[in-house]
Image (cartoon, helix red, strand yellow):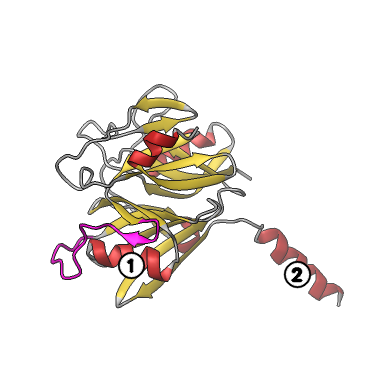
Amino acid sequence: MIRAALILLGLTLASPAGAVECRDTEFEGNRYTLCEVDPAQEDLRLFLKDDQGQGLGQFGAVNAMLATRGERLVFAMNAGMYHQDRSPVGLYVERGEELKQVVPNAGPGNFGLLPNGVFCIRPGRADVIETLRYIAEKPSCTYATQSGPMLVIEGALHPRFLPDSSSRYIRNGVGTSAEGTRAVFALSRNAVTFHEFGRFFRDELNLPQALYFDGNISRLYAPQIDRDDPGFALGPIVGVVETAE
């Protein structure tokens, strides 16, 4: 009995409530990796530059910066489109400071395929918010990144998505629950259409809001499932931080 109790205690200590959960799954013949975060329990942040103002660009660079503060990443993903110099295409807020203004108008590429949206992190919650709604409501985001297109808007797929589209890419994005305490980050493990990716968030994950981050360059850091995707330098990065042991 004592040995069983000690084992149970060890499992409890090893798996704290609110820990990031990452896993592989399938839906409608497509393969995905997802990481689920409770923003009310986890320290969810965005990263762009280091303390000297240099672009981070890599998960390893984020971890190196955090190590100087006695912290480390437990999960990370690329989090929005960026220009050649790795600056964000649209809105970017870090530690409450707006470093790039919101872009409300349509434009070329996936970012400008309206409606697009904003991923907003606030104390105790995180939300995907359609851009015009964000502009109207002016939420106070500690961190925010704008990307596009929206995948799911109030439970409906983006109106421009075609069920028979032939445009297939590796894609990644995030969906959030209505109360903002469930954020699911997903990356496809095979090329998918926007319609398929949106249905994954809406029909499999039951999330009413979801936002596309990017395609082809999609990358994931999830050491609990042995993922540390290499590649060229990124723009905005989203990640969960914990105190280093």
In whole angstroms, how far apart are the C-alphas of marks 2 and 1?
38 Å
* Residue corresponding to mark 1: 199
Percent position of residue 212, x then y = 31, 52
Q: Is residue 172 above or below residue 52?
A: below
Q: Is residue 245 above or below residue 29?
A: above
Q: Residue at x 49, y 28 (%)?
A: 96
The magenta region covers 153-169
Amino acid at the residue labelled 1: Arg
Q: Residue at x 71, y 63 (%)?
A: 12
Numbered label attached to residue 190: none
> In the displayed structure, does residue 2 sit left or right of residue 213?
right
> In the displayed structure, does residue 232 sit left or right of residue 3?
left
Q: Residue at x 52, y 56 (%)?
A: 182
Mark 1 surroundings within 10 Å by alpha-carbon count, few (fewer than 14), some (14 through 19), many (20 or more): many
Q: Residue at x 38, y 59 (%)?
A: 186
* Residue corresponding to mark 2: 8
Quarter of the figure with the N terminus: bottom right
**Residue 187 falls in image quadrant:** bottom left
Where disc 2 sits, the SS reads helix
238 and 199: which one is in front? 199
Residue 47, can we see it?
A: no
